[in-house]
Image: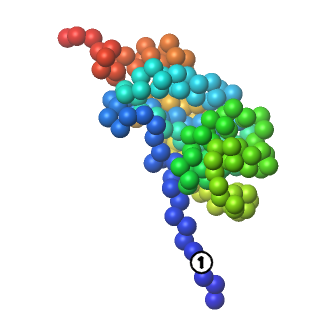
Amino acid sequence: MSITNKVEIIEPKTIWIGSEKAPVRLVMYGDYESEACAKAQETIDLLLEKYPDQIRFQFRHFPLTKVHQFAHKAAEAAVAAVQEGRFWEMHHLLFTHRKRLGSISLKEYAREAGVKDKNFIPKLVDSLYGWTVRADLLDGVDKGVREVPAVFINDTLYEGKITPTALVKHLQDHLPAKKKRA
């Protein structure tokens, strides 16, 4: 007779950055090995800095495993960091080091992000967080995501270029300080 412990996993879809009262919710589906996703994240970081009370942001995992062999494990490592409240630190480290995402590197980034779990690597090897990453991916597919980065603005897929200028222009209708007078 074996005793199994049910592990409660905190899902990334519960993690946001920015004011809860922000009128604009940005959600990006992305892949940690993608250059385009890294650039989109830089753009979103600039917007979060410029409009701290008006934009709320969430990152969802959409690893393109056919072209990026390390993307799924990197996403699992980010989920592992969520468990200790270190998601954003790990998230940014993964994008910064997107060309080095092997298991040993992931362990280094986790330590740098402040993750203390001594079973970090065994959990990655056992794919403890694999289904959590897959749930993000399937959610994205259900919403029409086919490529990354895919950015949703208040639940609507944004079709334009992901540059600071283009996004700000598009967001003007949603940002109270930028609304035109009737």
In screen coordinates, is 148 left or right of 28? right
Q: Between residue 91 and residue 146, name the one nearer to us.
A: 91
Quadrant position of residue 97: top right
Q: Residue furthest bottom?
A: 1
Q: In front here: 102 or 169?
A: 102
Q: Which residue is mark 1?
A: 4
Would residue 23 be seen by someone viewing this image from the given angle? Answer: yes
State which quarter of the image contains the N terminus: bottom right
Q: Residues within 10 Å of mark 1 (few under 14, many from 20)?
A: few
Q: How far from the left and from the top, in percent, is residue 26?
A: 45, 32
- The residue at the point 51 percent across, 64 percent down is 8
What residue do we see at 55% from left, 17% from top? 163
Q: Taking 28 as reference, is 18 left or right?
A: left
Q: Residue furthest left?
A: 182
Amino acid type for the residue under numbered disc 1: Thr
- Percent position (x, y) of residue 99? 77, 34
